[in-house]
């Protein structure tokens, strides 16, 4: 089951994706901002005619393949003018993964709120308890060297109030504040009992609501989710909900054939592609210099250093004040030799542009903009290249062992 957190209002998090264009340059593709973006829950945002422009931009950004028409067709079928943003995503992810058994649930469904109402009521009747339990667990994590993911505030209630916009609820004495509006505890509890659709859980209460609606055997979590779930055992006990097993989601980098051959041919460590700039490329090019050139430069450096050191050692017998000048001369000669070495590398770059292109391509694919591939590139890029069979391939080939980052050749 896939839980679409449709009541989140973080528009910046969902408005865009990044793909690599035909030259393997990262290209962000963003949606035009609908009315209410950043204030309303994502489920309340409606796509307008500008969605067509964004999809056209995606088509231009992606290199054309045999699968481009299929990809754009599936996206246009889901992301249509007049469709809610969350509904569009839920529709598309279900079309992609539903045939493999995935059930997609949109959390803003008002009918489901009736089932979650008792959780909201209990949170309001014991305000601050969820936050206190999570904060205590966070202190335990901190004592063991792990920074807590959620810094719960003592006056916070783990609910939002929905009335057009989503507003946090805070406790103030024997009443509550919704934004700047004061509400009695009794009135807010009654509203949760009669109109639970007006409430939404925050990050601490959302897993409780999930497992109330759908009793869960195992929760597959990303790194951030793993961190805050580590603070929730006491919260689960407080609500009388069995806490599911927590399993880290698979972590992988997808590498195509040319990139795999480049890495293997030069025995190039994948992680050395992450730093931006040309230092790693320079090291690679330097390693490909003819041995006699590299050795002759090293011999020259050693000979100059040894000869000048003999001069430095002999000078005090003649004039001690000349030692500093000799050291300066040595530094200048070493600098000039390094400059010569840099010019040699630049000559190698001009000579071997193919190697440079292979490096740049591999770096863009594996660490776009210097960040891990799985945290940067949108799935649209990979589906455009490999089509729907990519899903079958990952299901068959991606290992599920914990604690490993896998590199898969496609």
Image (spheres, grey):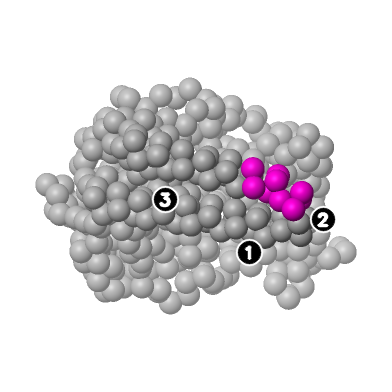
**Tag 2–tag 3 contact (CB < 8 Å):** no
Hey, which residue is sitting farthest front in the picture?
Answer: 318
Task: Judge whether residue 311 is colored magenta.
Answer: yes
Q: How crowded is mark 1: few (under 14 residues within 10 Å), some or many (20 or more)?
A: many
Relative to 108, say whether 175 is above or below: below
Q: Nearer the viewer, mark 3 or mark 1?
A: 3
Query: Which range is magenta?
Result: 310-318
Residue displayed at 77% across by 73% down: 182
Q: Nearer the viewer, mark 2 or mark 1?
A: 2
Residue highlighted by disc 3: 341
Considering depth in this image, is 205 or 27 the residue closer to the camera?
27
Hey, which residue is sitting farthest right in the picture?
Answer: 173
Residue highlighted by disc 1: 161
198 on left or right of 355: right
- Mark 2 and mark 3 lie on one chain; the one further toward the N terminus is 2
Residue highlighted by disc 2: 154
Counting from the top left corner in percent of width and height, residue 3 is at 47, 44
Residue 187 in view in this figure: yes
378 on left or right of 319: left
Residue displayed at 79% across by 46% down: 135
Counting from the top left corner in percent of width and height, residue 376 is at 42, 51
If the image is split into quadrants, where does the C terminus sit? top left
Considering depth in this image, is 220 or 409 the residue closer to the camera?
409
Q: What element does badge 1 sit on?
A: strand
């Amino acid at each position: 089951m896939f839980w679409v957190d449709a009541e989140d209002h973080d528009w910046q998090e969902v408005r865009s994706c990044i793909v690599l264009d035909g030259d393997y340059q990262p290209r962000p593709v963003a949606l035009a901002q609908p009315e209410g973006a950043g204030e309303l829950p994502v489920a309340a945002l409606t796509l307008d005619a500008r969605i067509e422009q964004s999809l056209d931009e995606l088509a231009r950004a992606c290199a054309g393949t045999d699968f481009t028409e299929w990809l754009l067709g599936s996206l246009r079928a889901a992301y249509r003018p007049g469709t809610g943003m969350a509904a569009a995503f839920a529709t598309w992810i279900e079309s992609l993964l539903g045939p493999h058994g995935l059930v997609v649930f949109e959390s803003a469904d008002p009918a489901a709120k009736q089932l979650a109402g008792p959780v909201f009521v209990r949170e309001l009747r014991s305000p601050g308890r969820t936050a206190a339990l999570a904060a205590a667990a966070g202190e335990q994590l901190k004592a063991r060297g792990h920074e807590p993911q959620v810094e719960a505030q003592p006056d916070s209630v783990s609910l939002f109030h929905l009335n057009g916009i989503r507003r946090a609820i805070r406790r103030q004495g024997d009443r509550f504040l919704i934004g700047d509006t004061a509400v009695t505890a009794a009135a807010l509890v009654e509203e949760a009992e009669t109109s639970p659709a007006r409430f939404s859980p925050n990050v601490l209460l959302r897993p409780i609501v999930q497992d109330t609606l759908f009793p869960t055997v195992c929760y597959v979590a990303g790194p951030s989710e793993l961190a805050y779930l580590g603070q929730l055992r006491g919260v689960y006990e407080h609500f009388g909900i069995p806490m599911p097993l927590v399993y880290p989601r698979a972590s992988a980098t997808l590498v195509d054939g040319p990139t795999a051959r480049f890495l293997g041919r030069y025995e190039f460590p994948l992680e050395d592609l992450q730093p931006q700039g040309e230092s790693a490329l320079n090291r690679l090019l330097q390693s490909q210099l003819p041995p006699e050139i590299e050795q002759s430069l090293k011999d020259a450096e050693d000979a100059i250093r040894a000869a000048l050191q003999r001069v430095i050692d002999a000078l005090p017998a003649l004039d001690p004040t000349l030692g500093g000048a000799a050291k300066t001369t040595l530094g200048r000669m070493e600098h000039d030799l390094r400059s010569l070495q840099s010019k040699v590398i630049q000559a190698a770059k001009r000579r071997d542009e193919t190697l440079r292109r292979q490096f740049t391509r591999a770096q863009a694919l594996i660490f776009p903009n210097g960040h891990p591939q799985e945290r940067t590139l949108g799935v649209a890029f990979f589906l455009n290249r490999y089509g729907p069979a990519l899903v079958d391939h990952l299901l068959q080939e991606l290992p599920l062992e914990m604690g490993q980052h896998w590199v898969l050749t496609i």
